[in-house]
Image (tube, coloured by chain):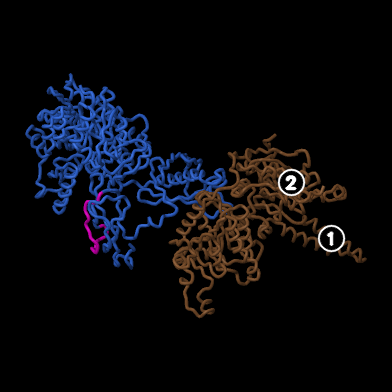
Amino acid sequence: MIRKLLIANRGEIARRVIRTCREVGVSPVAVFSDPDEHAPHVREADAAVRLPGDAPSGTYLRGDALVAAALAAGADAVHPGYGFLSENASFARAVQAAGLTWVGPDPEVIDAMGSKVAAKKRMAAAGVPVLPEFDPESAREFPLLVKASAGGGGRGMRVVRSAAELAGQVAAARREAESAFGDGTVFCEPLLEHARHVEVQVLADAHGTVWALGERECSIQRRHQKIIEETPSPAVTPQARARLFDAATKAAEAIGYVGAGTVEFLFTDDGSFHFLEVNTRLQVEHPVTEEVFGVDLVAWQLAIAEGARLHGEPPTPNGHAIEARLYAEDPAHDWRPASGTVHRFAVPDGVRVDSGVEDGTEVGVHYDPMLAKVIAWAPTRHAAIRKLAAALERTELHGLVTNRDLLVRTLRHPEFGAGNTHTGFLDEHALTTPPDADVRPAALAAALALAERRRGSLPLASLPLGWRNLPSQPQKTVFEHGGDTVEVDYRHTRAGVETSLDLTVVAASPTEVTVERGGVRTTFPVAVYGDRVEVGAVSLKLRPRFPEPAAKVAEGATVAPMPGTVVRVAVEPGQRVEPRAELFVLEAMKMEHRVPSAAGGTVVEVLVQAGQQVDAGDVLAVVAEDPLAGSSEGAAV
Amino acid sequence: MTILRTVVDGRSPEYAGNREALLARLAELDAEQAKALAGGGAKYAERHHKRGKLLVRERIELLVDQDSPFLELSPLAAWGTDYPVGASVVTGIGVVEGVECVIVANDPTVRGGASNPWTLRKTFRANDIALQNRLPLIGLVESGGADLPSQSEIFIPGGRAFRDLTRLSAAGVPTISTVFGNATAGGAYVPGMSDYVVMIEERSKVFLGGPPLVKMATGEESDDESLGGARMHGTTSGLADFVAEDEVDAIRLTRRVVARLNRRKLGPAPKPVEPPLYDEDGLLGLVPTDLRVPFDPREVIARIVDGSRFDEFKPDYGTSLVTGWADLHGYPIGVLANARGVLFSAEAQKATQFIQLANASDTPLLFLQNTTGYMVGAQYEQGGIIKHGAMMINAVANSRVPHLTVVMGASYGAGNYGMCGRAYDPRFLFTWPNAKSAVMGPKQLAGVLSIVARQAAAAKGQDYDEEHDAAMRQMVEGQIEQQSLAAFLSGRLYDDGVIDPRDTRTVLGLCLSAIHSGPIKGAEGYGVFRM
């Protein structure tokens, strides 16, 4: 019997496991790194153990510290969550060696599946279809995919379309894999560009019973990271489903799998599929299976770890469930991760929310930028999609740039509705670039709400705002939206608000502005956090009326696009560079980001070195523009 | 009844006629104010912009807190003179970093921002407002100096500009000069006399004598920058306390200066504010087009005071003058308003008592003028109208609580004095566009002249030329009428501006708030009241 469970994880999954602990009466113990000291999962657990430090390598990836934490807290079992050490066999062994129960499959199984290269061989032997494999140094068939043997979550994965890029991408993948998993082994496979990612949830007890609990379609991905998952898959026919379940069951049986696991396949619309890997842990997207099968997979994990049997037939599926992952990242800017404070996070009722954040949570640079998962269930796929899109659209998510709009756009895309999804879906339909929506009405609402908020700082708040006896010009407010500048004008008059926008302002308060356009009234909710103004789903940054002179960046200066660590400096002073040439590589959130030169010309100054931590907006280098490129003299430093 | 009830019929033909007439006056006012707004006109505005400079009102809009109200003062200054309407300077009360300030800003598009006699008067009025109400004074300076053809009217009185600055400073009212361009010769003393000076790199030029004058005086070869550039003043002479990168940066620095003045208001804070029960729009229909027809000022009071609440004092005594207490934008005030034009002995005595009461309770006073003067005639002279009128004028003149005056209609004769006209130093005085002010009505004045001439002719035994008399009367009537008009009086700085009646509450609230920057304290003594 498990009485006290150490959860060797953080964020959303730690909270998810705590929830089941409460259901079944197990006492949860949390661990936390220094930046996570005030995280919700720490507060919600019965006890918490500090893992000093901030980077994962010194905290959530420290098996010895985690085992020590479990022993110190008096835990009798360890749940690894997903990511971090969840598929690390030596950690599983260390847990068992300390006399604790490991909630997961046998370390031997993890080992066997941990190397993707070895796993493929084993599956092929058991009769599960697999893809051919190329040598990373000499592959000749393109496009191909470089993958980290120890990988997962898209890390250490690179697409290569020509022989010329191969060496560079392999090297980059190795670096990323080394940093993320401590193992730089990579291999290559043909890239099936329009294939679907379909996986089967299996649940196996220690007594030889294996259940296949439906498939999940996880084709909507960005940078090989799933963002929308659903069950059942719209592409899988009953016949194909039977074959998939059969292959998954065979795979689990072949390795003597115990617990909750996932067998991933690449699925093509002719019904054929190839084995990708076995995930020997709970998947991020497990909630869709839970919603459709009415099971608690975490509860089953605990029960199986205690030796329970799977009785009778697997539960029968009911309806359709779909999950979307909210990430703090900017899809329009190369998925640049965002950090900062989540000022407000509230999802409308009627959907399931598995969240790592709440109002006021700080999202830092050290961990995965996933904020939450929102899961909708409905009797049919269409109904579930509609419900999820609406819930996401109406979610209050203030303070950070997120992928929310992209998720809504994807869910509402007719091809998605038709079930025509594949792993290249976002690129094929150009969904990463936001459509040219007119955000000016929202910006005007923001400006008017800000005006109402300024009343309090005026000497006499009851006087009409912006009153003039001789009006000469309107009030102007400038916002930034995405990379664009949005300027709105307004003037408070006796007859109401005058604006050059083609709309009428019906009412304005500090939190709500109602406008009328073509006879239709719309009310914009407005929330303000410092210079961030959130108007419904439109996120604006208020441009100050007076720029601080020091904040003006010298012409030709290249600034850090996000906080992170400089991993490589590609130039030195005096060197000539082309516009957009790569100057630096920054690592943030375990991803490498190339920083291009803001201008073409001669590098005047390099202000950072490899290993240095930088903040968004820090000047990294200054390039004097080429006289030929237009400017007649060198840009000021 | 504390809450006033309106009896105005908004659907009556009189109301509609009054409204239409007043709207026509407002349209005329707009046209005159548009001249001030246009400054030097489109051509000069464009040239100014092309030099990378902001127009004067753009500077002010950027200087004041976003969405704060701004009251421009004396916009019609120089109306009816040979100089452009507005007098090449913009003055007003604005909020900077939460502090109400007086802003005096040259309009360099009007004849280079050169000062003419009206520029001086308008600026001096703004200086007075700063001093009386303890409002920091911010000068946005860019002026070519004095308008030389009119130097004889400028040179001697113009010295007051510098005297005012240092007296403000001595009185504890901060002065700030932000120099956008030239401030040379005498103009150099404007920054020179200010507490704080902001200059702009490569823009500000502050020197006593420019290169040609220096060459003439001493033979020295020099240039603008070495004589008076911002950098020189920032690094060498020390005249500039802050050197800004550009105009926007200069305004930012000016705002930072105000933010660090640590100003706090010395008057009591306002109470919670309730709007009036009646719409301000009704003010347009109240005032008869014929000034001889009186109207009930309670209808005006009901539309400008908080909650339309008015506690009337002596409602049944001296009923031609309404007196009582109210709040306006949260500030307590005493109101004196003419109800039937003429002031009799009872009204004068009632006003005298009321003014003393307001001083006893440190309550500011609001005068709503619509008066044709003190009553004349044997009965009234024998009843002591002179000494009663004198009591009222004594009380008004020696009252020390702040006064606000609004001329709603007529302002004739000594009524103008008793009801706190310009000569009695109200803190602010505003005029409705229909108002008229003179020693007496044009008809009366022409009639008096006619009677006097007729008597003179009779004394000499001459025949009286009736035709000539009619022509004279018409000429005099026309001239007096012209000189009684709001725009004419405003052009001569006899008020602080002509306002839309619908803005009365806002303007008064803004003024009361500004006034409360200083202390509010009643009089401790009066002149001898002749009993």
Identify the mark nearer the N-term, 1 or 2. Answer: 2
Q: Quadrant of the N terminus of chain A?
A: top left
Chain that bears disc 1: B
Residue B134 image point, x, y percent: 59, 53
In-image side of B470 versus A333 (left or right): right
Mark 1, residues whose alpha carbon is within 10 Å: few (<14), some, or many (≥20)? some
Marks 1 & 2, CB-CB < 8 Å contact: no
Q: Quadrant of residue A363?
A: top left
Residue A202 image point, x, y percent: 17, 28
Residue A461 on the magenta span: no
Which residues make up the magenta segment?
Answer: A565-580
Cα gap from disc 1 to disc 2, whole angstroms: 30 Å
- Of the pair A172 and B512, the residue shown nearer to us: B512
Colour blue, chain? A
Q: Amino acid at mark 2?
A: Asn
Secondary element at image label 2: strand
Q: Amino acid at mark 1?
A: Ser
Name of the residue lying farthest toward the top: A312
Indicate which label's residue lies in the foreground, 1 or 2.
2
Q: Quadrant of residue B353?
A: top right
Residue under pointer 2: B338
Q: Which of the numbered marks, if any, corresponds to residue B450?
A: 1
